[in-house]
Image: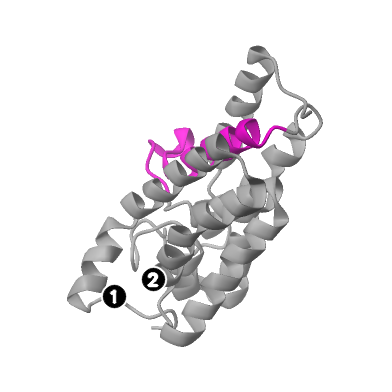
Amino acid sequence: MSKKLSNYMLTALILIAYLVGSINSAIILSKVLKLPDPRTQGSKNPGATNMLRIGGKKIAAFVLLIDVWKGLSPILLAYSYTSSSLELSIIALFAFLGHVYPVFYSFKGGKGVATFIGGLIGINPLVGLSFILIWLFVAKVLNISSLSALVATLLTPIVFYFIEMDIEATGVIALICLWIFFTHRSNIKRLVSGEEGQINS
């Protein structure tokens, strides 16, 4: 039987996850390295894909790793107190929400994919790995970051359920996935119109 959190501890971990998620590495690195603010350049999204255009591969990779860590670290902390997939998925949700609606940046953040991946890796590495492999496959074939993320996001609740076999936790993961589609609504419009840019463009 899995350990479960008290309401007080769950609330504390949710708050930590949200605050960690609210730290935006793209914005911070841009200031430190005197690069253009990613919120004013390219796609205007403070995430790894836009940083690839602004600062190059090394900086984009660093941003990606930090954003993944933002989703992973609260889960690793929570494992000291719980092994409940539902509680871990709720903590992952709030790390994701911190990235998308960061308290430190007027609640205007990124799209949350990398932070979501970190949360998935924390909950179950197989689910996180499946997301990454699907993303890489679609990106290799079509060279469109947003489409790769959307395809991987669409399939993740199915993968999660068959690995975790927890319908309530799957519901939380599905909610995050729906939110990712919402954060990508402008990308979806460009995909439909054939105007979405490629990864290296």
Whether residue 25 is visible: no
Asked whether the beta carbons under mark 2 and mark 1 sit within 8 Å of each other, the answer is: yes
Q: Nearer the viewer, residue 128 or 55?
A: 128
Type of the residue with mark 1 = Glu
Indicate whether 50 appears above or below 17: below
Whether residue 166 is visible: yes
Q: Nearer the viewer, residue 193 or 30?
A: 193
Residue occupying the point 43% across, 67% down:
151
Observer-side mark, 2 or 1, equals: 2
Q: Is residue 71 left or right of residue 46?
A: right
Type of the residue with mark 2 = Leu
Indicate whether 101 appears above or below 187: above
Whole-angstrom CA distance, mark 2 to mark 1, is 9 Å
Horizontal and vertical percent for residue 184?
33, 57
Residue occupying the point 77% across, 29% down:
2
Q: Is residue 183 left or right of residue 151?
A: left
Could you classify mark 1 by the number of other residues whose Cα lies within 10 Å: few (under 14), some (14-19), or many (20 or more)?
A: some
Question: In the rendering, which numbered label is found on residue 147?
Answer: 2
At mark 2, the secondary structure is helix
Horizontal and vertical percent for residue 10?
64, 21
Question: In the rendering, which numbered label is found on residue 196?
Answer: 1
Horizontal and vertical percent for residue 67?
59, 53
State which region is magenta. Answer: 84-109
